[in-house]
Image: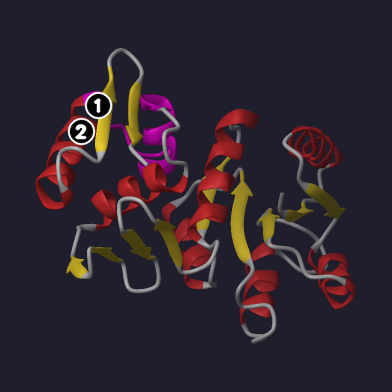
Amino acid sequence: MAKILIVDDEEDIRTLLLYNLKREGHDVSCAQNGKEAAESLEVSAPDLIILDVMMPQMDGIEFCEYVKANPKWEHIIICFLTARGEDYSQIAGFQSGGDDYVTKPIKPKVLISRLNALLRRNNGSEIFDNKQHIKIDRERYLVIKDGAEIHLPRKEFELLALLVSKPTFVFNREAILTSVWGTEIIVGDRTIDVHIRKIREKIGSDLISTVKGVGYKFNS
């Protein structure tokens, strides 16, 4: 369970997100604008903020900069959720310190999958699988197997980290595509297969199993 703050001036959006995130078991609160959200941070800081761009009193870009400028809040994950899809708006979002930028409309299930991926990515710097002696160092983007460091390209690293995060759980292709590539980039099933093959070549073919017609799992 994560503590999530929704910052959006549209009541319908706040209500929809609040309902779906609470169903997932998260502790959720809301603010109508950046100023109100800034005041709430002084009381209790969330793990993740879902942030609109266009808001009165303090817009999303200003609020994101405000959060990231304070050392006690810089760890907070910020996901922009906005109707502004222009390239310059996305660039401004990332430059202000945002971790992801999602354009409306988006299905709640897809958004939740994106948010869960962000939370997993920020959940400490390491994941261990004691039986297989695999260590994921998220801060240095390193895989350590039996004491040896293995350097993987970013997408291979993200894919392996996703599988290791829930050993024996079968991730279907849709979940993998959403978590690793997101919804803004169109890639085919073959892309996943190629990345899995390359990962197997580097860490061992016995650590990842194919579940035909479904997806892949990490063998604990």
Residue at the spot 35% in from the left edge and 51% down from the top edge: 131
Q: Say whether residue 2 is left or right of residue 31.
A: left
178 w.r.t. 117: above or below: above
On the image, which quarter does residue 205 sit in? top left
Indicate the position of residue 122 as horizontal and vertical percent values. 53, 62
Q: Is residue 71 magenta?
A: no
On the image, which quarter does residue 96 sit in? bottom right
Number of numbered labels in the structure image: 2
The residue carrying pointer 1 sits among few (fewer than 14), some (14 to 19) or many (20 or more) residues within 10 Å by Cα, namely few
Residue at the spot 55% in from the left edge and 38% down from the top edge: 113
The mark found on residue 188 in the picture is: 1
Q: Depth check: 48 or 162 in front?
A: 162
Indicate the position of residue 210 as horizontal and vertical percent values. 26, 25
**Do labels 1 and 2 touch, CB within 8 Å?**
yes
Q: Residue furthest top?
A: 213
Indicate the position of residue 46 as horizontal and vertical percent values. 75, 64
Q: Say whether residue 62 is left or right of residue 165.
A: right
The residue carrying pointer 2 sits among few (fewer than 14), some (14 to 19) or many (20 or more) residues within 10 Å by Cα, namely few
Q: Which residue is mark 2?
A: 191
Indicate the position of residue 148 as horizontal and vertical percent values. 18, 69
Residues in magenta, as a range: 171-189
Q: Say whether residue 121 is left or right of residue 68.
A: left
Q: Depth check: 175 or 61 in front?
A: 175
Q: CA distance from mark 1 to mark 2?
A: 6 Å
Q: Is residue 183 magenta?
A: yes
- Amino acid identity at mark 1: Gly
Q: Depth check: 173 or 200 in front?
A: 200
